[in-house]
Amino acid sequence: MNLNPNYVTSYAESFIKVLIEYSPKLISAFIILFFGLYTIRLINRLIRKIMVKRELDPTLTKFLADILLWVLRVLLFVTFIDKLGIGTSSFVAILGAMGLAVGLSLQGSLSNFAGGMLIILFKPFKVGDTIEAQGISGTVNEIQIFVTKIINSNNQTIFIPNGSLSNGTITNYSLQGSRRADLTISISYDTDIRKAKNIIITVLNNNPKVLKSPEAEVSVKNITDSSIQIAVRPWAKNDDFGSVSSDTLENCKIAFDAAEIVIQPFVKEVSKND
């Protein structure tokens, strides 16, 4: 195939002419792009520093900074496309259609996103709190946009979707700073109730981790066919709650043994027809 040199020369001249005419737009578009990316990083760092100085919640700070970062990036990209001479109206329409399609396919994720927003804004708990929700109990390790990460007592990492978490019942054990243990000790009918109660009160008074205020409660909880149940309800700081519960039971058993008081074991009634 023979090429006409005149055609080649004509095409080359046309290409060079277009390139020369278009090069200012191309150069200015890339200058805007690189300068915009640099400016966005500076703005993001500045906003983060301002929110840290205002002592905003770390999760809220990260969330707002990330949202601002992506909004500015989208605006910069639209400006870059417009500077190249590409029509932005059709581009924005395509983005809108894509956003609608993605939104319909990710309804569950959007629900979790909204739940994360509610948790961050209304703060039913924060990082470090001990909570119980969705049948899970543990310490909040991180509040992400879509899920909340919880570490349970077995050091297992559990991720709970924010949608179900924000719509369900949440028990925050750390919010008040102290907790009350609800313990039950069963004694036999042969035991002097007042003597048993005094021993329990002495055990509680000798434990420095048991709070003096509110005062611990020691009272008869129930009288069953096999035993007398005594409710023991000491108060403790959140960090001492576990040790206070276990120490109370252990020290009461030791004190009862020394006083020759028998702790009545649980007796399950079994039908003869079983």
Image (cartoon, rainbow, N blue to C red):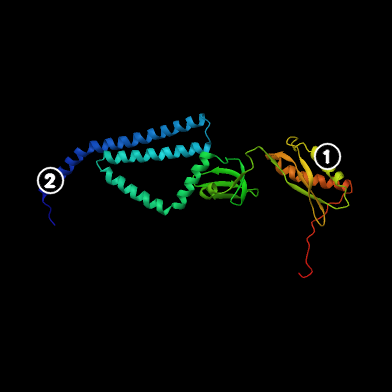
Residue 73 pos. (x, y %): 37, 39
Mark 1: secondary structure: helix
Mark 2: secondary structure: helix
Residues under labels 1 and 2: Cα distance? 106 Å
Q: Which residue is mark 1?
A: 202
Q: Find residue 251 and report its image quarter.
A: top right
Q: Which residue is mark 2?
A: 10
Residue at 38% over, 33% down:
39
Crowding near pointer 2: few (<14 within 10 Å), some, many (20+)?
few
In-front residue for pair 235/157: 235
Residue 2 pos. (x, y %): 12, 55
Residue 74 pos. (x, y %): 36, 41
Residue type (three-letter) at the residue carrying disc 2: Ser
Total labels: the figure holds: 2
**Quarter the C terminus occupies:** bottom right
Residue 273 pos. (x, y %): 77, 70
**Quarter the N terminus occupies:** bottom left
Q: Is residue 155 left or right of residue 39?
A: right
Residue at 34% over, 39% down:
75
Residue type (three-letter) at the residue carrying disc 1: Thr
Q: Is residue 60 left or right of residue 38?
A: right
Crowding near pointer 1: few (<14 within 10 Å), some, many (20+)?
few
| Circles 1 and 2: CB atoms closer than 8 Å | no
Residue farthest bottom in this picture: 273
In-front residue for pair 202/148: 202
Q: Is residue 21 left or right of residue 75?
A: left
Residue at 69% over, 41% down:
179
| Foreground: disc 1 or disc 2 | 1
In-front residue for pair 270/148: 270
Residue 133 badge: none
Tell me if residue 270 comes above or below residue 90 in the rendering.
below
Q: Tag 2 or tag 1, which sits nearer the N-term?
A: 2
